[in-house]
Image (tube, rainbow, N blue to C red):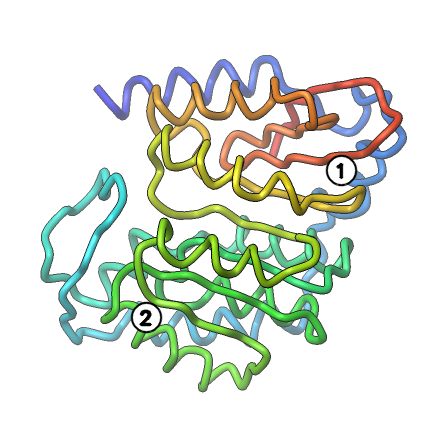
Amino acid sequence: MFNLRFAIDYLLHRFKAKNRHGIHSPFVYRLVDKVIYDFEAKKVYTEVENLRKQLLIDNRIITITDLGAGSHVNNNRQKKISGIAHNALKQPRLAQLLYRLVANLKPHNIIELGTCLGLTTLYLQKAAPDAKVYTLEGCPETAGIAKETFKKGNINNVDLITGNFDDTLPGVIDDLDKIDFVFVDGNHQKEATLKYFEWCLPKVNENTLLIFDDIYWSEGMKTAWKEIKAHPKVTITIDLFWIGLVFFKSGRVKEDFLVKF
């Protein structure tokens, strides 16, 4: 049922979505043309993807602590790292898009909910080396592998925080004067997603970008995405099917865009 529903949602999105030439907002057109559709190879891609290859052949087994909605593929608590790398890591095309979005925004701080094995964190940090990255992970053993990934990737200025997002995220937000970039890739439940969104709102600004992963994951996530888009503080959203981008640009007409990716 999940695969059928997901396939239908995907086909409907492809049918309705536009490419850069169907977009009349100068801000969104530039973002799509110069950032989202920038498919030119970059040196950092090779560096990070070489670490992905290592994870894909790592047959160590770890015990998963899952505090969210679980997986559509494998909900066993004992998992090989190679299996997690195959099923849970962001695919290169999407992880590299996150890199470009961060490089374009040049944030001073980055919050990632859902470290997993640390590969996406590498992309985020390397896109803005001077930014402070807070990456939150619910599973201690997964976080341990992420630390190994960070060491291999030679990144610093990353604060890896382990625990339930309900316990760890408020403290991170409270310590910041403002929030620049947030990537929500954990839990995947309606109530939790909306809660994290609401917690971020007091610290957003003109240049803040919030990104929500798996917005078509379930009926609950689709509802959460609709409610986020409708919030009065939100002025621009870009639905790429796999992720949703949320902006808070003042003085703009509220617009929602469906973009092919």
Q: The residue tagged with tag 2: helix, strand or loop?
A: helix
Residue 113 position, x and y percent, is 45, 53
Whether 57 is drawn above or below 15: the answer is below
206 or 88, which lies in front? 206
Q: The residue tagged with tag 1: helix, strand or loop?
A: helix
Whether 15 is drawn above or below 214: the answer is above
Residue 69 position, x and y percent, is 25, 39
Residue drawn at x 26%, y 62% is 139
Residue that carries the numbered disc 1 in the rendered image: 32
Which is more N-terminal, label 2 or label 1?
Answer: 1
Disc 1 to disc 2, C-alpha distance: 33 Å
Residue drawn at x 14%, y 47% is 75
- Mark 1 crowdedness (10 Å alpha carbons): few <14, some 14-19, many ≥20: many
Residue drawn at x 24%, y 75% is 58
Residue 212 position, x and y percent, is 51, 39
Residue that carries the numbered disc 2 in the rendered image: 143
Q: Name the quarter where the N terminus is drawn.
A: top left
75 or 227, which lies in front? 227
The kind of residue on which mark 1 rests is Val
